[in-house]
Image: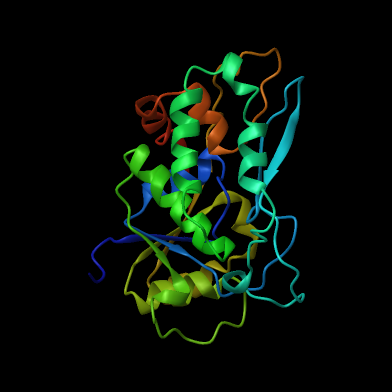
């Protein structure tokens, strides 16, 4: 599959990310999980946010094995000796009283949890693919380190996107608007790749509390909204150049 208006997005493998991540997957023809860059702690790879019982939010997360500072994402291992899955499911218990889709959502998560994964990127890959099926998102997802793709040497952060798109002969790249600052438009123009940015519009739904907590994990959205309702929300964004 070459050129001809194919759209691609490339992101690090996030743990049950917010709805904007799924909007991005849904907006493109090919989605690549970039796992060959250095893992940075306290990002979104091993944790995300859900509602806290009495207001506010808390982190649901995966414990990781100790690793050196320059370890790549693909080599970050889960500390499976801890009962982290049980803890995560316990943290979701408060939703039971307020969320209409508590049972459907926990069933989906238990299905993802039913397998053992050595690395966080393998776990996140399975979770993302499972949720995409649930939300009727058809976009294929690939793990970069498993693609055996020869790309030009990357000298700056934006060149991962540029060089992967070039190697795949894809002519449109879409990135979340939050990362706009790292991109040099000129490089993309020179290579005939159309660089665009996706901005999630203000998505608000009823969380059965006074104050809306924005930008929580897709888990929170799934608790309160059906898969069909979320599928419609996936188009609630703006694309800019």
Against 48, residue 195 (above or below) is: below
The residue shown at (57%, 65%) is 119
As drawn, is 5 to the left or to the right of 87? left
Against 25, residue 100 (above or below) is: above
The residue shown at (58%, 19%) is 96
The percent coordinates of residue 92 (x first, y second) are 62, 30
The number of numbered discs placed on residues in the rendered structure image is: 0
The percent coordinates of residue 86 (x first, y second) are 63, 41
Say how the picture is coloured: rainbow
Closer to the camera, 178 or 40?
Answer: 40
The percent coordinates of residue 62 (x first, y second) are 66, 52
As drawn, is 58 to the left or to the right of 50? right
The residue shown at (51%, 75%) is 187
The residue shown at (74%, 35%) is 58
Q: Quadrant of the N terminus?
A: bottom left
The percent coordinates of residue 84 (x first, y second) are 66, 48
**Quadrant of residue 209 within the rendered picture:** top right
Against 191, residue 213 (above or below) is: above
Closer to the camera, 129 or 139?
Answer: 129
Against 10, residue 108 (above or below) is: above
Closer to the camera, 216 or 92?
Answer: 92
């Amino acid at each position: 599959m070459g050129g001809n208006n194919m759209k691609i997005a490339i992101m690090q493998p996030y743990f049950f990310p917010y709805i904007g991540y799924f909007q991005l997957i849904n907006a493109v023809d090919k989605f690549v999980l970039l796992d060959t860059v250095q893992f940075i702690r306290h990002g979104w790879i091993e944790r995300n946010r859900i509602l806290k019982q009495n207001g506010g939010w808390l982190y649901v997360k995966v414990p990781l094995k100790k690793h050196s500072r320059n370890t790549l994402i693909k080599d970050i291992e889960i500390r499976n000796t801890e009962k982290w899955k049980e803890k995560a499911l316990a943290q979701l218990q408060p939703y039971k009283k307020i969320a209409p889709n508590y049972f459907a959502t926990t069933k989906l998560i238990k299905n993802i949890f039913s397998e053992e994964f050595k690395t966080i990127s393998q776990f996140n890959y399975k979770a993302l693919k499972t949720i995409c099926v649930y939300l009727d998102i058809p976009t294929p997802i690939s793990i970069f380190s498993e693609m055996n793709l020869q790309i030009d040497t990357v000298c700056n952060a934006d060149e991962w996107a540029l060089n992967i798109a070039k190697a795949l002969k894809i002519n449109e790249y879409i990135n979340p608007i939050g990362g706009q600052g790292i991109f040099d438009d000129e490089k993309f123009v020179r290579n005939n790749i159309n660089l665009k940015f996706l901005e999630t519009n203000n998505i608000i739904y009823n969380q059965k509390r006074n104050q809306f907590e924005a930008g929580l994990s897709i888990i929170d959205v799934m608790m309160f909204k059906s898969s069909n309702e979320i599928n419609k929300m996936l188009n609630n964004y703006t694309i800019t150049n």
